[in-house]
């Protein structure tokens, strides 16, 4: 899938907890996927992966502080 540079986008700032909740919601949507347009499912996979990257980055950055 190629990104369309003309497509509008926005930036959000969320807490780590909210990032995980968003990730979990998208993951659940994929798991209960009733079918439909393949492009929507593809975008859900991309969104899930991007959110998971954020979760992992947070966990990695805060690994030492969690162990103290």
Image (tube, rainbow, N blue to C red):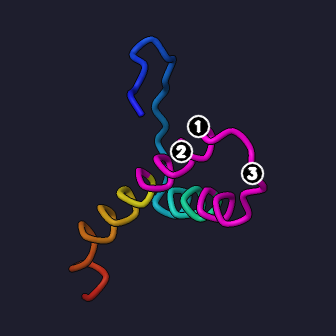
Q: How many labels does the image show?
A: 3
Q: Distance between the residues labelled 3 and 2?
A: 12 Å
Seen in the image, is 48 located left or right of residue 1?
right
Q: Which of 3 and 36 is in front in this view?
A: 36
| Labels 3 and 2: the sequence-earlier one | 3
The image position of residue 13, as x and y in percent, is 46, 42
Q: Quadrant of residue 61?
A: bottom left
Q: In which quarter of the image is residue 57?
A: bottom left
**Residue most extreme to the right:** 34
Magenta stretch encompasses residue 25: no
Mark number displayed over residue 39:
1
For mark 3, what is the residue? 35
Q: What element carries label 1?
A: helix
Q: Do the residues bearing badges 1 and 2 touch, measured as CB atoms within 8 Å?
A: yes
For mark 2, what is the residue? 42
**Dot 3, how many residues are within 10 Å of its Cα: few (below 14), some (14-19), or many (20+)?**
few
Q: Is mark 3 on a helix, strand or loop?
A: loop
What residue lies at 50% left-to-right and 57% top-to-bottom? 19
What segment carries the magenta color?
26-50
Q: How far apart are marks 1 and 3 (CA)?
A: 11 Å
Position of 38 relative to 45 (above/below): above
The image position of residue 47, as x and y in percent, is 50, 47
């Amino acid at each position: 899938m190629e990104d369309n540079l003309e497509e509008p986008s926005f930036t959000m700032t969320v807490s780590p907890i909210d990032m995980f909740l968003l990730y979990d919601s998208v993951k659940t949507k994929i798991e209960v996927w009733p079918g439909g347009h393949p492009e929507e499912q593809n975008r859900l996979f991309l969104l899930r992966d991007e959110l998971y990257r954020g979760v992992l980055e947070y966990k990695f950055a805060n690994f030492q502080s969690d162990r103290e």
